[in-house]
Image (spheres, rainbow, N blue to C red):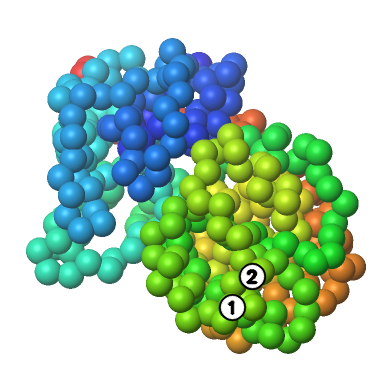
């Protein structure tokens, strides 16, 4: 039996699917502690916590888009076998990594690191990232993140365990695809980082080519009005904005779609790609989406385009919109692939990592 303690930032509904499967595993005794109850960018409805979950008292300091957490919590690690951190920009992670990592195996589990901050903020992030040198291992979220961490920490074992979420409701009551005209779905914040401006430009080109199609946008409005403004009226007539939707409502919108697009300029992973897979949708992703490398097989269940390349995005959209058979084939391929992306599969992979770490020689554990 492995006694596992996980520190995560917020009760994300997608991480919680994996935690639930992990807690039910016969070889795991799980405890999950969250640094805050909710995230300002993701107003998910709060749901009751499981007995193994708890939100710690504390807060955070905001610095641009970064948040540095502090919590009133003294870790009790006497009976813990492995500690997992899903973030390192917080006092608890830094405290344990710098004072306890020689006594108990610590794992960092994260998306690809982005070094886009400069000045004092960038220096602080670099200092905090040095704490990862004390980890016994790193578990990367996606194969691209795995490559990044192998380069940054060549002396450490690095594993790849992406996000696994419950896709059951996404693959129920699926329609016959494609419908005419096909509906293209994009789900995420309506911001340039998600490539929404690129998608609108590319979709306008599809409509102007004479091919029938509709675009369904789901997510926080953010900068959408400004991005929509330059579009011709005949293009706007084919666009529907459904606003932010709670996770329980999302399957309905994925069922309405025939094709999924996520053209982000950067996305550490992108759980919406898991959901598109579960809904049996052909997937068009930019190569800056972490999930693309693991969930999209080009020419089989979708297409990967260079980030920021509008011409490549137009070509990918036209390929599917003009070819119903391509949509049907890619749809079936996504459904087949989704069978390997359940929370139970993710929990099994985590247990395999626990077994490897506890089998490897390490510094003898001292009393805590």
Q: On the rendered image, what quadrant is the C terminus found in?
A: top left
Q: Which residue is mark 1?
A: 233
Q: Which residue is mark 2?
A: 237
Q: Is residue 134 visible?
A: yes
28 sits left or right of 210 in the view:
left
3D distance between C-alphas at marks 1 and 2: 6 Å
Above or below, 119 relative to 6:
below
Above or below, 89 relative to 190:
above
Mark 1: give few (<14), some (14-19) or many (20+) Cα within 10 Å: few
Q: Do the residues bearing badges 1 and 2 touch, measured as CB atoms within 8 Å?
A: yes
Residue 225, given in percent of the width and then of the height, sits at: 43, 67
Residue at 80% in and 66% down: 181
* Closer to the camera in the image, 231 or 133: 231
Residue 109's image quarter? top left
Residue at 14% in and 57% down: 124
Residue 53's image quarter? top left
Residue 69's image quarter? top left
């Amino acid at each position: 039996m492995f006694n596992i303690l996980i520190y995560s930032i917020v009760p994300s509904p997608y991480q919680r699917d994996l935690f639930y499967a992990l807690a039910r595993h016969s070889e795991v005794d799980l405890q999950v502690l969250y640094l805050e109850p909710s995230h300002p960018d993701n107003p998910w409805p709060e749901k009751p916590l499981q007995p193994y979950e708890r939100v710690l008292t504390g807060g955070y300091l905001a610095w641009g888009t970064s948040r540095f957490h502090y919590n009133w919590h003294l870790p009790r690690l006497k009976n813990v076998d492995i500690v997992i951190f899903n973030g390192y920009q917080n006092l608890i992670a830094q405290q344990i990594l710098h004072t306890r990592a020689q006594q108990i195996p610590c794992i960092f589990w994260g998306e690809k690191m982005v070094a886009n901050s400069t000045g004092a903020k960038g220096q602080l992030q670099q200092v905090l990232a040095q704490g990862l040198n004390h980890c016994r291992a790193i578990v990367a979220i996606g194969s691209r993140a795995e490559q990044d961490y192998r380069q940054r920490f060549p002396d450490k074992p690095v594993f790849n365990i992406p996000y696994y979420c419950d896709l059951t409701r996404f693959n129920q009551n699926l329609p016959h695809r494609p419908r005419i005209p096909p509906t293209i779905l994009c789900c995420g914040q309506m911001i340039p980082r998600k490539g929404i401006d690129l998608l609108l430009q590319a979709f306008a080109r599809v409509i102007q080519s004479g091919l029938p199609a509709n675009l369904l946008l789901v997510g926080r409005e953010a900068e959408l009005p400004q991005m929509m403004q330059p579009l011709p009226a005949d293009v706007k007539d084919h666009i529907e904005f459904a606003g932010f939707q709670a996770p329980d409502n999302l399957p309905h919108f994925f069922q309405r779609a025939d094709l999924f697009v996520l053209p982000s300029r950067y996305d550490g992973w992108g759980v919406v790609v898991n959901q598109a897979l579960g809904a049996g949708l052909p997937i068009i992703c930019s190569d800056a989406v972490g999930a693309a490398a693991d969930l999209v097989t080009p020419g089989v269940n979708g297409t990967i385009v260079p980030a920021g390349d509008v011409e490549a995005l137009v070509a990918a959209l036209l390929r599917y919109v003009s070819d119903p058979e391509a949509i049907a084939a890619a749809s079936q391929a996504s459904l087949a692939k989704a069978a390997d992306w359940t929370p139970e599969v993710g929990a099994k992979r985590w247990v395999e990592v626990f077994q490897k770490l506890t089998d490897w020689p390490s510094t003898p554990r001292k009393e805590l």
